[in-house]
Amino acid sequence: MATREQALVKKIKEWTGSTQIGDDCAVLEGGMLVSTDTLVEGTHFRLDCIDWRRLGWRSCAVNLSDIAAMAGRPRYLTVALTLPRAQAGSEADQQMQNNLEQFYVGFTACASLYQAQIVGGDLTVGEHVIINVTAIGAGHEAGTLRRGGARAGDAVVVSGVFGASAAGLQILLSKNISAKTKYSELVTAHLEPKPRLCESWALVRITGERGALMDASDGLADALYQIAEQSNVDIDIDLAAIPISAPTLEYAASLGVNTDAIQWALYGGEDYELVATMAADLWDAQSQADFPFKKIGVVVERAAASTNIDENQPNQPIIRLLGNGAASKSNASVVDLNHCFKHFC
């Protein structure tokens, strides 16, 4: 079923009458893309788990990921910061300036890598660090992909691997120094995500605007659900096909039977990989060695309301999780968004 956050977004669309709300970016006249995102200390990051340089990189990367989720090209960024008050000339003031310098070193490094420029922002004082970034981009010359373009029969494809960021966060929270060293790849996946811009361009060059696309910022399960909902379809996923890295599997196994890497992959979030659908014939025509996506499932016709999982929300999509490609749908589990991170309980 839909989360409360998704329900609130629907109400905001009703209250505002906006036709632009619902994708990772708003698409403006001329094909310009605009997105905004907020990172709040204690909710999206902890300063005892991340240094300021990496916080800058991460703040930029997660916003550029929204541009990638529309297959766009990033152009400009504004950065608004809320920072704790510090007496001018004090040791705390000097430390704040040092922190800000490192933040912008990291932010600029990420922005420059993807040819985006910081063009403005705002500074204010508050009790906690709050980072608000607006990303402005241009639509790709081959077209713009949205969440609502999936059709029955499409292949469901993803970039990269899933669950690494959730595993990395677990390591950071555990304060386990040896695990942090051994599984540094997972820690980096959480602290320095890579926006999949090149991958999105490779996709849109093949599909044009025929297909669906978004990023998995809130988890693979959430992305699949939102694509299915906006496309009015259901989706069948082969659990065995979901790409999970060997370090993620190894670290999950080291924590014992109560930790399942597939749960991190589905619900952990913050992997910032792409989730897409494309016509089956286009998928079949791709060289698996060169194309930066893997198939994990198929789009199917929306089930009748009477057979839907939640009787109180009969028009909600079903995301079936099949044990393998030949598993019976009647025995499949389904995505439960209650396992995802929820801003509004």
Image (cartoon, grey):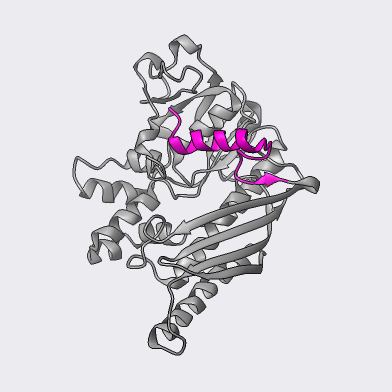
Q: Which residues are magenta?
A: 1-27
Q: Please, is residue 154 above or below residue 208 in the view?
A: above
Q: Is residue 65 left or right of residue 342?
A: right
Q: Residue extending furthest top?
A: 306
* Image quadrant where one finds the C terminus: top left
Task: Name the outermost residue toward the right.
Answer: 30
x, y percent for residue 101: 51, 79
**Near-viewer residue (167 or 58):** 58
Can residue 47 be seen in the rendering of this structure? yes
Note whether residue 147 is visible: no
Is residue 255 in the magenta section? no
107 and 295: which one is in front?
107
Q: Residue furthest bottom?
A: 89
Residue displayed at 49% across by 76% down:
100
Give coordinates of residue 25: x percent, y percent.
64, 46
Q: Nearer the viewer, residue 282 or 208?
A: 208
Indicate whether 210 appears above or below 318: below
Residue 23: in magenta span? yes
In the rendered structure, the answer to whether residue 323 lies left or right of residue 38 reads left
Q: Is residue 303 left or right of residue 258?
A: right
Classify residue 19 as left or right of residue 300: right
**x, y (%) of residue 222?**
46, 37
User: Residue 321: image x %, image y %?
Assistant: 40, 26
